[in-house]
Image (tube, rainbow, N blue to C red):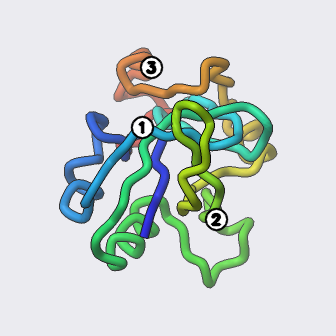
Amino acid sequence: MQIFVYGTLKPGEAYYERYCEPYVETAIAAWVRGHIYHLPQGYPAVTLGDGWVSGALLHLRDESALAALDRFEDYDPTRPPEANEYTRQLLSVFDGDRAPLGQAWVYFMTVDRVQHYGGVLISDGTWSRAQWHSIAPDSPYHRSR
């Protein structure tokens, strides 16, 4: 099973070791089609689109990892889509030359929700918490993700 991660779950970011690393067989740089935004809460969101978003393609050895990641992302497939912050969907994933790597699960957000949250488009397609350290922990927008 594969999942594409682009934010706090990427290798080297805040939650990779806790939520992903125990399940990962391989991790490689990868891209999906879409747009990535920084949210005032301190984490990113991807929307579907024609741009490119960079991240990591994780090959997971254990399907129970998906349930753990669903809990982390507050995603429940039995809820109506509007009740979830993110939607999880299989999307095509590509390498650096834009050659297909297959499909992977991706958590994405609707454009309406990103706009509601006040998301800031990241034009180069790459999110890193180090770039967005300006979100103060005591800010009403900070969320410990």
Q: Amino acid at mark 3?
A: Trp
Whether pointer 3 and pointer 2 mark residues with C-beta atoms closer than 8 Å, the reply is no
Compare marks 1 and 3 and give the one earlier in the sequence: 1
Residue 70 x/y as whole percent: 46, 68
Q: Name the residue at 29% across, 75% down.
A: 62
Q: Residue 13 in the image: x percent, y percent?
A: 31, 36
Q: Is residue 16 above or below residue 102?
A: above
Given the image, on which type of amino acid does mark 1 rest?
A: Ala
- Dot 2 falls on a residue whose secondary structure is strand
- For residue 29, the mark is 1
Q: Earlier in the sequence, mark 3 or mark 2?
A: 2
Residue assigned mark 3: 132
- Residue identified by numbered label 2: 89
Give the residue displayed 32% in from the left and 48% down from the top. Answer: 27
The x, y position of residue 37, in whole percent, is: 63, 31
Residues at circles 1 and 2 in contact by the CB criterion of under 8 Å: no
Q: Of the residues tagged 3 and 2, which is closer to the observer?
A: 2
